[in-house]
Amino acid sequence: MKLIYNIGLLVGIQPEGVLRLEGPAQGQTGTLENAWLAIENGRIKAFGPMSSLDVTPGPGQESLDACGGMLMPGFCDSHTHVVYAGSRDGEFLDKINGLSYEEIAARGGGILNSSDLLHATSEDELYKQSMVRVQEVMEKGTVALEIKSGYGLNPEDELKMLRVIRRIRETVPAAVKSTFLGAHAVGRGYSHEAYVQAVIDMIPQAAEYADFVDVFCDEGFFTVEDTERILSAAKGLLTPKIHANELAVSGGVQVGVKHGALSVDHLERTTDAEIEALRGSDTMPTMLPGSSFFLGLPYGRAKDYLKAGLGVALASDYNPGSSPCGDMRFVMAQGCIKMRLTPVEAFNAVTLNSAYAMGLSHELGSVTVGKKAGLILTHPGWNLTKIAYHYQTPFLREVFF
Ligand code: NIG
Ligand code: FE
């Protein structure tokens, strides 16, 4: 057993069975000052105020003096593309010179550029390059992440990506969920129609590796009708998580909700109709402020979603084209600074709600007895407001998995 004592602030305490936080509940979190927490076999065994700690930590019992630091659930990142090959830094100059995401893609850059690089990279090398990024985000406090395919864009290379994701899942202490995003862009050599059919044909094999299916349902990529066909083919095999409303109001939210999507992600462009469609559903609206920042897109209307009684998750979208950064603390800070979420709302968005958006909130995302001890211990004196406010000052002392 491991005992962490002298915790200045224990945050993210939730009763068992709370799997997501919506509306006003997203602005609340259970907090304990001067606390202890015990971990056994990687799970939270118990916690309480220091006044209730009758066992003095001694020899034989592994113990850690938190020295007044804050202990919080680790970050859960429900939307990433960290498996990719090489770099797209060449496109960064095009972007600086004023080309839009769509214009870069239309010139053969973007996703197809990553697809060519991935095709030319061995599976081992792809694993090594991707692991550098997974290591990076774990060091920054991410204890769970979803990883998508979608740079293969043909059956062989999509499976190569899914095998790499599986290998990462088997190697790292963080929890990993896998998503088949065959419908990320039309693969080279296919017509649009032939590629949609190819994606449908890939589903049974992809389902042996992946937990979820995703479609980039957006202007210039895949239509609502394409999405409808792909999700119908995946029914019973893979739960949907949809890229929707990044480049245009796409109808992706509605088709996702209709097919019981666990999340609909991006939502930079939404009208009240999307908020209405999400009401009463099990789908978690997920916003990716890193892409708004990098591409200069509007930030999602998180506050309006909360006002409508919905919950909101935030994720990094770590990828080489629209969000080359997987720092979930920066995501949380942007939630506060750009989307006007309170620090507690943003914190719940990057922990419990993001865990929900990848089907992990029964295991992670809050301080709850029995859950996995995926936790972050900070240096003394930190609280949720400060970690978003001083968003670049080192705060992290240790990450527990
Ligand atoms: O979530 N929008 C689609 N896919 C990614 C970008 C992928 C890329 O450009 O490589 C995203 O933003
Ligand atoms: Fe994405």
Image (cartoon, helix red, strand yellow):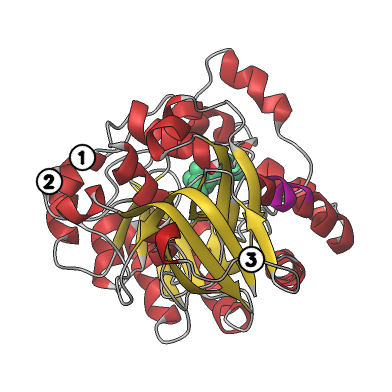
Task: Please tell me whether mark 2 or mark 3 is closer to you in this view.
Answer: 3
Q: CA distance from mark 1 to mark 3?
A: 44 Å
Query: What amino acid is labelled 2 in the image?
Result: Lys
Q: Residue at x 34, y 38 (%)?
A: 343
- Callout 1 touching callout 2 (CB < 8 Å): yes
**First of labels 1, 3 by sequence position:** 3
Labelled pair 1, 3 in contact (Cβ < 8 Å): no
Circle nearer the viewer, 1 or 3: 3
Residue matched to label 2: 307
Q: How many marks?
A: 3
Q: Which residue is denoted by mark 3 in the rendering?
A: 57
The picture places residue 334, in percent across and down from the top left corner, at 41, 31
Percent position (x, y) of residue 21? 26, 60
x, y percentage for residue 80?
Answer: 56, 52
Disc 3 residue crowd, few under 14, some 14–19, many 20+, Cα 10 Å? some
Q: Secondary structure at mark 2?
A: helix
Residue 244 or residue 28, whichever sits in front: 28
Tag 3: amino acid: Pro
Query: Which numbered dot is residue 303?
Result: 1
For this view, does 66 lie left or right of residue 35?
A: right
